Amino acid sequence: MMDEKPDTDLMKDLLAVQAQMIRDQEETLALAEECHALDRKIRDATHNMALLEKIQSENAFLDESSKKIHEIGQRFDSLRQQLTTGVALSKQEKKMLKAEADRLSGMIVDIQSRQPTHIVQPVPQTTAPPASEERKPAPKISSPLQ
């Protein structure tokens, strides 16, 4: 009978160690799952931050584009008013103003039709000659029929 008792104590110790190992393994698995969930949250947060940066960049682009479109529109209206009121004195000046008005109109349509996928560099504007300069009238050519 002496041999059975130490085996029973040994068995109880082994069962206790095995039970502890099972608890430790379950705790390790729970920690691994928690770690995985935290990794997922980190990836989601990083993705959301990248999206936020992209949205902020697009908003800045749209704000700048809106300002530029407004400026172009004001210049376009000014050119249109000059053409309709006859402030432009010579045919060449009227032709240049009409060309600039057409170019600005095309730019407005082009900018409005584009998606904000990248920042567009502003197009340098050519300035029309100042209206305050004195213009010499073109010499009249007499027709041989007159």
Image: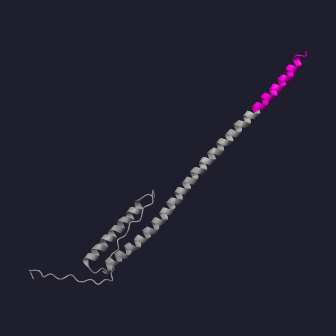
- Residue under the image location 45 percent in, 65 percent down: 65
**Residue 145 lies in quadrant:** bottom left
- Residue under the image location 40 percent in, 60 percent down: 113
Instruction: Indicate the position of residue 100 as horizontal and vertical percent values.
Output: 33, 71
Instruction: Indicate the position of residue 50 as horizontal and vertical percent values.
Output: 55, 53
- Residue under the image location 57 percent in, 50 percent down: 47
Residue 13 drawn in magenta:
yes
Give the camera-side residue of 135 and 88: 135
2 in relation to 83, above or below: above
Give the camera-side residue of 77 and 6: 6
Instruction: Indicate the position of residue 62 as horizontal and vertical percent values.
Output: 48, 63
Instruction: Indicate the position of residue 57 as horizontal and vertical percent values.
Output: 51, 59
Give the extent of the magenta segment. Answer: 1-22
- Residue under the image location 83 percent in, 26 percent down: 13
110 sits to left or right of 35? left
16 in relation to 99, above or below: above
Quarter of the picture containing the N terminus is top right
83 in relation to 29, above or below: below
Residue 9 drawn in magenta:
yes
Of all residues, the one furthest to the right in this rendering is 1
Instruction: Considering the whole magenta stretch, tell me its main secondary structure.
Output: helix
Give the camera-side residue of 18 and 110: 18
52 sits to left or right of 122? right
